[in-house]
């Protein structure tokens, strides 16, 4: 029943938060072993020096990026945009699977990439080999095990897409306006130091940032356009929450005439009935990041506001798990024909 | 230049958070003195037993409500809805000013009150004597010193009204849809114990509550309808933030054709140019509750999203000050013909 | 290699924090299954109603305490003191193992129990069947699989005992004074509502409580006296930390003449060299609750202060895991002859 | 009654946290005006650009240090150690008062300074003009208005000295051991970025640092030796608390034989009976940083542990106010013969 394979995993960019979360989760994965880690900033240092939490669990020493590909069956990369492409090309050439937690392969439209990232593709030919995969929404899920490159979705886009896809695809709501008010914990800003994430600036504070101009916008629009069957635009405003982990997206669309509460809940429940990582909450309950943190779960709650004909959808994930490392492992499981839940069925802590 | 008057203040409901904040602020007010405090739950106990922070500053003992009116020139009430009306009637009869931090006098339309609070007015005749006052937006501000009853606005409505009034009144935006995504610190839920505000439930957590059904909705619509010159409806979703103080409201409306960024900033700057408590932030900066906490300030930032024709307005206040006790004192200053800023020009702590 | 047994577990007091943590951890245990849960306050409600985090993972309905014993091989009880004894007696009679996370069986000296808990034993005869077990320090560890009742240690005593036992037993330090300054996250105060753990009271706050009079004092002294080979007394002051989880104990004892830094580190490293759950940190690093939270680990750091001849020992655990549910499962593993680490080798999250 | 003088204040190092707090507090001071601010890192930038909280309140532009002395009556310096001495010399020469929030003038023993700061005095001759002043404990308080240089005490030493001075001076306790376990909010680490104060590292975390080797140790010993009338040594361990503001010091000394609880409380109450900024808490209450934050107050609670003959003293201050800017202003008030409380009688917020 359980597979005997042991996937050799290399992590590039292992000392960033997504990399560290991969280490934590893969340690508990019965069919994967982290065999090599790489980090530009901490080369030759043990990972457990950077994260004392890992002492005794993962004391691998960070190698140069060039040394890790050959040791592995699959390479996870958590790198700033622009740096994944050449590494993906190398993996492709060497027949290694490549799972990119960065932005390089997320947009299918190169022009959109240029517009938002101010950069062209360096290796345009390899983009055809890449599949963008939120597994629950991915049309290629069944055939995905053939893919060599997986574009692992962004954290905000994952929370938004899981929240709005059913309503748009099943025709519950209008496609304009789509207002997305997201709030993310501070791990979303990464391990790098900044005034914004200095404790005294971030604690007992709250504000939006990059309102309408965040780079996750085109990725969100790409998925929602697919759901709607036509191009849609969204107003997307992220905020920085004074918590370590978690994203809550509160989303506002207009209900189509005649849609009933029962229909809304039915659509969502059916859409996700076979999905172990998505919970559609009972009527009257609210999705709360508390209930998903440290896990690969996505909780969705639905709140029609009949006074204004608005469907309010609330979606929450752990930005570092379903929004990054967990979903990447879920994608790895698919690539290697393991049950998607392998190593990922973690009970959310109650507190 | 400075007035010599000393206003005798009584606070009813003094041991709730709004009451405690009144005590803190009035202690620093040169023309007011708290002469009596009342509390149902803590009768005969010193306020400083309930709040050791006040020891040595305010050691008044909580009296029965019936004993405090006579000692005062003005009564502040911070009571659950339904309890202010009879007290206001008593004050009116005795010629005492009454400033209500509760909901009883906020809605001019009794039917709306009935609908949202499931209760009729007990003393409908005295409602004519009440003025609802966010001073910066109050048409009666100049003549308000005659008022006997002031309905001090709710915390969310204050943040929303200050943020959207200029855009609606000056015709920058359409009146539909109006999406209001608000986030409040936990003091907004009061001093009473609840699972939601139990530390381990609230810390490292985030969720909306009462989506579309919060009682501040009709109060928001009342003010925005006045601004727009016609009835408007809003979609209002509050969220609970894991911080002690502060509200951030992120608001979404559609820009009218042809409106420019310059116009937007001009309208807001002109609207508030003489207002000491409102700061329209420079282009590119974001209103952050960190910069207003413990003070009566309201920061507003403006973010047109040209891709979708949306005006994103962000407004932040300290829910306990401009959203409650501070604004109540600002209203008291008006009633007693003092400069509005008296006792309220507190520099926000930088951290 | 891996055992095939499946231990049937019942949890009494399942809706308290320790109970909920047992559920979380046992779900990931390959040889245990939670078959029944009981809760006085939430009888007939699903556990996932109380903790929506568990929805889909554990939807067991809380039964009456009387119904759960028969269904199980082992009963975990997380009850207020005084309530475990009769339940233990019932288990003993029915041949079920009983693991008590409460205080009833922790003190071997009934007089000490009476003094600190103001109560006599109800079933004094069954106390002989109980073993108090911090496994790393338990003399009966090898023979413990015969035990019918396990007294699972308190959270503070676990952190203190693991930190000071080696120094006292190996004669590095004097036995007087022993100063213990402990700080615990708010889960230590339980799920019950109180002003102290109301979010706005606990957040951005810090204070000691029960200085010198906390009920964990005799339990600490019992273990340290055993280590020292003679009766010792400690000054113990707990504090409430504004975090959800974790205990840090900073402990001060006087070094015996001639002891060197090398000796100190050697003693601790040798003492714990075969212990998978204890990490003695390298010289110069500090034990931080961040590095153990959500896991069964205990980190210990050592800081001799030569100026004053003081050995400063810092010990940190997750109060809900090694301080409660995790250690209880570790004890269950011993009872059922499983490797102690079964189901408990969780990598601490880096953030 | 109130003085008419207006002290012209310059702040050097104004963009650090202590500098910013001086700005906040001096704005509310009736006899002081901040006329010039200086900052190496932000020269030519408005202070309100660095701290948007100050916009509209203090929009002074940071000047070069060389430009600010002449404009002022008193210079406050909040600089890294070693940088205050030359500035003090300049002020002395120009007849300006100098209040140093840094470490350069705190130790009267140059050798101790060399040992702990690895540096000699650059201007040894001016140290005679300096007075170290925790006003409540300063023997020169009455004559201090003649002083040209004030060494404003460190944050930890202030909390410790106020807590232990009475017990040592009045002979309640032995002078060995003296164990000091202090916990400070993150503002104590300053505005500069560091991994330790990165939000995700500091939040939901807790650990000691610099155990036994913190530079405040000799300053603490200097004051306590004075209190004891003989040289004393202390074991001092600071910890980083996940809050913005506040220090709690829990201190352990051995009671002398025969001392009673009544005596203990009497000594402390008498010692501080005329001190507006120190509150000795009633028996059974605990000093909590919540009750002093944002103010110049120090709360002290006393807990004799008769079982071990230990006096546990808990002292709490706001590290940025009584531990830095507030005490500096209190000292300024003394220099300029104003009531010590001028501008400083702020009611602590209850939350």
Image (cartoon, coloured by chain):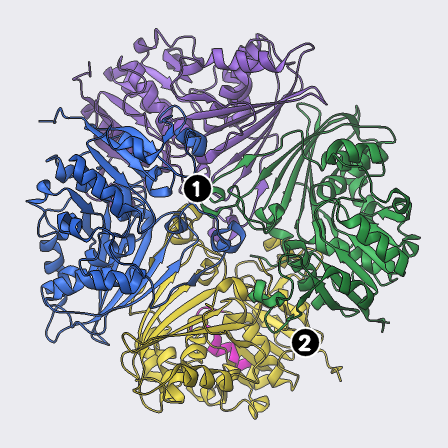
Chain colours: A yellow, B blue, C green, D purple
Please state the horizontal and vertical placement of residue A229, each as a whole percent of the image: 35, 91
Please state the horizontal and vertical placement of residue D53, each as a whole percent of the image: 28, 44
Please state the horizontal and vertical placement of residue A10, each as a whole percent of the image: 62, 72
Q: Are marks 1 and 2 on the same chain?
A: no
Residue D200 seen in render: yes
Q: In which quadrant will I find the C terminus of chain C?
A: bottom right
- Residue at position x 22%, y 43% in the image: B88
Q: Residues within 10 Å of mark 2 (few under 14, many from 20)?
A: some
Depth-wise, is mark 1 or mark 2 nearer the camera? Answer: 1
- Which of B134/C264 is in front? B134
Residue D210 drawn in magenta: no
Distance Cα–Cα, label 1 vs label 2: 44 Å
Residue under pointer 1:
D244
Residue under pointer 2:
A8
Residue D282's place in the image compared with B318, above or below, is: above
Residue D7's place in the image compared with A22, above or below, is: above
Magenta span covers which residues?
Answer: A79-90
Please state the horizontal and vertical placement of residue C332, each as a whole percent of the image: 81, 59
Relative to B199, A116 lies left or right? left
- Residue at position x 18%, y 69% in the image: B232
The subunit carrying tag 1 is D
């Amino acid at each position: 029943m359980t597979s005997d394979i042991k996937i050799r995993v290399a992590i590039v960019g292992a000392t960033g938060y997504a990399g560290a979360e991969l280490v934590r989760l893969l340690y508990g994965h019965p069919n994967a072993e982290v065999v090599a880690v790489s980090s530009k900033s901490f080369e030759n240092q043990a990972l457990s020096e950077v994260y004392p939490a890992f002492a005794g669990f993962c004391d691998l020493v960070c190698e140069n990026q060039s040394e890790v590909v050959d040791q592995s069956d699959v390479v996870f990369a958590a790198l700033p945009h622009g740096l994944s492409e050449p590494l993906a090309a190398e993996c492709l050439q060497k027949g290694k699977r490549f799972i990119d937690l960065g932005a390089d392969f997320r947009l299918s439209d190169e022009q959109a990439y240029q517009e938002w990232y101010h950069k062209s593709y360096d290796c345009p030919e390899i983009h055809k080999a890449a599949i963008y995969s939120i597994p629950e929404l991915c049309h290629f899920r069944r055939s995905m095990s053939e893919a060599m490159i997986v574009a692992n979705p962004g954290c905000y886009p994952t929370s938004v897409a899981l929240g709005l896809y059913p309503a748009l695809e099943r025709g519950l709501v209008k496609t304009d306006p789509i207002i997305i008010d997201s709030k993310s914990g501070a791990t979303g800003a990464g391990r790098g130091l900044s005034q914004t994430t200095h404790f005294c600036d971030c604690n007992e504070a709250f504000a939006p940032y990059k309102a309408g101009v965040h780079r996750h916008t085109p990725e969100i629009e790409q998925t929602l356009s697919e759901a709607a069957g036509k191009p849609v635009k969204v107003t997307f405003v992220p905020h920085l929450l004074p918590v370590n982990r978690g994203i809550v997206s509160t989303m506002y669309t207009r209900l189509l005439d005649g849609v009933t509460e029962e229909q809304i809940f039915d659509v969502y429940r059916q859409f996700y009935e076979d999905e172990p990582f998505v919970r559609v909450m009972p009527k009257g309950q609210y999705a709360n990041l508390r209930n998903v943190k440290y896990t690969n779960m996505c909780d969705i709650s639905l709140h029609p506001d009949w006074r204004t004909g608005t469907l309010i959808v609330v979606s929450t994930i752990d930005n570092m798990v379903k929004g990054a490392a967990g979903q990447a492992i879920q994608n790895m499981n698919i690539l290697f024909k393991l049950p998607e839940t392998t190593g990922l069925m973690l009970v959310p802590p109650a507190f």
